Image (cartoon, helix red, strand yellow):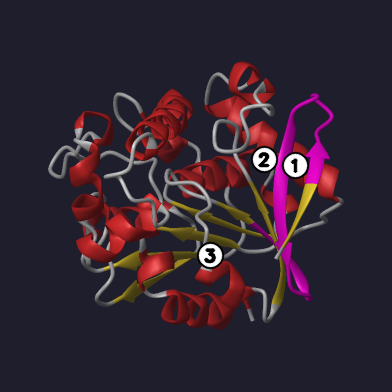
Amino acid sequence: MKRRELTTRRGISLEVLEAGEGAPLLYLHGIAGLLDDEPLIEALARRYRVHAPVWPGYGPESDDSGEVELEDMQDFALHGWDIAEGLGLERPHLLGHSMGGMIAAEMACLAPQQIDKLVLVAAAGLWLDDHPIPDLFAISPFKVAETLFHDAQAGEALLGGGADFSQDGALTDFMVGNARRLGMAGKILFPIPNRRVDRRLYRVSGDALVLWGRQDQWLVPAYAEQWQALLPAAQLAWIDDAAHMLPYEAPAEAAEAIAKFLG
């Protein structure tokens, strides 16, 4: 994968990971950001030209303009379209995971004719009173992996990037970076990840795929069924032995389901 620098028309600087050839696919990462290894992006790049922007707060601290400029969900959604414009993308497939799925859905509501197909992977954005969502901002960092991953031990290794927290400074660096990421994500996810997108989903005119891990403990499967019910034309696909972070736990299976849908 290659990295490129991009400055949007609003003046926000960011990095974009790019890989592959084929139809354009805009990939919006989730609350954990883009990790050192991105197996789903690599798998999708075998069939599509994948563009994966880094959200403000998740890149180098020097690129901090977006952390100030983006204040609410409308800002995030418009920033997504500014990125697509800056990349010269015309009717890309739009895929979002977790927080990125929440933003992708809002983008599709704003400009339904400007995307080809929509893929929501364990998307945040809804709220069901019968299934309250655990507050990630109140969970100990040492408990996050078991909340988001089916295999908590593997999840800890992925989220930690292989860092040895027994060494001086390693845990501090991780905690500072994590606080910065969560501070940005909190603008749209805190106190609950509900910005009333359910009232706008009727505007999504194209086909959509809702992709979910059966073992998701953060956004339980009832949320997948609710997304499918609210979207005008949506398919629902399940991934076994995977939780909220299914792009990392079952990338081959996820890529296969996405490719089957996108064609």
Q: In which quarter of the image is the C terminus?
A: bottom right
Answer whether residue 17 is magenta in the image. yes
In percent of width and height, residue 192 lies at 30, 29
* Label 3 sits on residue: 38
**In the rendered structure, which disc, 2 or 3, sits on the residue that comes first in sequence?**
3
In percent of width and height, residue 140 lies at 19, 35
In the picture shown, does residue 4 fall above or below 22?
Answer: above
Q: Is residue 158 left or right of residue 220?
A: right
Q: In this view, does 202 lie to the left or right of 143?
A: right
CB within 8 Å, label 2 to label 1: yes
Name the residue rendered at 71%, 74% in the picture: 48
Q: Distance between the residues labelled 2 and 1?
A: 5 Å
* Label 2 sits on residue: 80
Name the residue rendered at 41%, 67% in the picture: 248
Task: Say what amino acid the circle numbered 2 marks.
Answer: Gly
In percent of width and height, residue 201 lies at 49, 45
Q: Is mark 3 on a helix, strand or loop?
A: loop
